[in-house]
Image: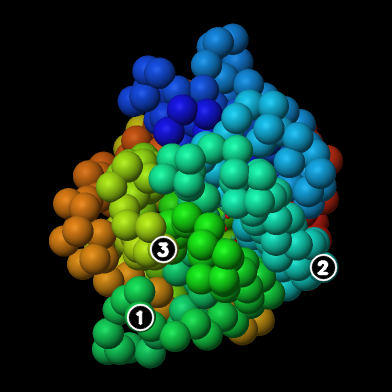
Amino acid sequence: MKHVLITGGAGFIGSNFIHYLLRIEPGIHVINLDALTYAGSLENLKDVADDPRYTFVQGDICDTEFVGELLKKYEVDTVVHFAAESHVDRSILGPRQFIETNIMGTFSLLEAARKFWLQEKSLPLENVRFHHVSTDEVFGSLAPGEPAWTEETPYAPNSPYAASKASSDHLVRSYGHTYGLPFTMTNCSNNYGPYQFPEKLIPLIILNALDGKPLPVYGDGQQIRDWLHVEDHCEAIHLVLKKGSIGSTYNIGGENQPANLTIVETICEILDEISANDNHKPHKNLIEFVKDRPGHDRRYDMDTHKISGELGWRPRHTLTEGLLNTVNWYLSHPEWVSAIRQKQEYKGWLDANYKSR
Ligand code: NAD
Ligand code: TYD
């Protein structure tokens, strides 16, 4: 792993992963290919912008020729593919972009990698890797008491987002099976932590609570997600890149499954404790139950025995400690927060998703 192309590196998990890689791999060159959609921001990478080991390239993963040129120019041996449209609610209101980016974009990257690595044989095959970052949402929804998903569980995606990610997973697998493309894949549960765009539950609740705005809880708030701190996710991906077996997929999860309402209440309690502004305390009075998400998945739960058994990975953060450090991160980065709040795409999204709920 010398020249690593990270797609979507200006987004939430991608930017955390770039920070992680530069910290842990002194000899690495990271090329970040990102289209800078509403979800991507170079603010997330300000502190590494001048690092000689880091190169930013603005561009679209759907442009196969452009990606091919990048692979050649930088002699890329490893692709770590994060770029995606990633928000379920947006996929419900406008699915087309999800098909374009998540399916066609992955196809485009696979084609560029196939040409450079397999047809032109530009690098020794044992040195190259296509790592695909995916989600637990491809598995659908669990009923109470049903066992957690394993790597063998059949896919049953429910939202356009989940279906587009499932489709991209199948494409990656098929390139391994048909063409011999050396790939690994990870399916991870809900992430939280620094740099997450505040359309997702945890940062949305933190920012609304700080503003004294309503805290929207969909339906009865008893839906369950398997929360993982983003640094634990980064560590797991790095481990799979180093030690994972080619052609394998690994489930990654946080080993905890609180209901959404519990998450929201916990954030309120943390803010009651640490926020300097007393005006909105107790924050839980801001909770508002709103119209449910159509087709809302009820419960996610990942069985992580494969990655813990084979690679020795386990999450390091407990949810309590991870949430506290996340709330602190948003409190201590007012410039980052205010830059996002001023984005028209952010204000527009709040209107589109919440006004009619
Ligand atoms: P994000 O929405 O924060 O970031 C996505 C990034 O991709 C942005 O920087 C955006 O500009 C970029 N991008 C979008 N379209 C692009 C294109 N056509 N070309 C180049 N760049 C493009 O997403 P995230 O939450 O960081 O998720 C990253 C990956 O991890 C996604 O593949 C997602 O499916 C997966 N994942 C996310 C979670 C989660 O909880 N956030 C959990 C499991 C898996
Ligand atoms: P989200 O962060 O959008 O992630 P995902 O849909 O990928 O799991 O949502 C997490 C959970 O929180 C999900 O069950 C939907 C719920 N939710 C709310 O109740 N209110 C909100 O305003 C948002 C954004 C999500």
Mark whose residue sits in front, 2 or 1: 1
Q: Which amino acid does label 1 sit on?
A: Glu
Q: Where is residue 224 in the image (x, y as percent from the top left)?
A: 40, 72
Residue 152: numbered disc: 1
Residue toward you, 50 or 256: 50
Residue 96: numbered disc: 2
**In the rendered image, is residue 291 in sight?**
no
Q: How far apart are marks 3 and 2 (CA)?
A: 29 Å
**Disc 3: which residue:** 247
Vertical arrangement, residue 329 with respect to residue 39, above or below = above
Q: What residue type is labelled 2?
A: Arg
Horizontal side of 258 relative to 76 (left or right) equals left
Q: Is mark 2 on a helix, strand or loop?
A: helix
Query: Image point 34% across, 49% down: which residue?
Result: 240
Residue toward you, 215 or 286: 215
Answer yes or no: disc 1 within 8 Å of ligand 1: no
Marked residue nearer the N-terminal end (2 or 1): 2
> How has the structure been colored for display?
rainbow
Q: Which amino acid does label 3 sit on?
A: Gly
Vertical arrangement, residue 356 with respect to residue 59, above or below = below
Marked residue nearer the N-terminal end (3 or 2): 2
Q: Do the residues labelled 2 and 1 touch (CB within 8 Å)?
A: no
Q: Distance between the residues labelled 2 and 1?
A: 29 Å
Query: Image point 38% across, 83% down: which residue?
Result: 153
User: Where is ligand 2, by quadrant?
Assistant: bottom right
Q: Quadrant of the C terminus?
A: bottom right
**In the rendered image, is residue 34 in sight?**
yes
Horizontal side of 307 relative to 233 (left or right) equals left
Q: Which quarter of the figure has residue 111?
A: bottom right
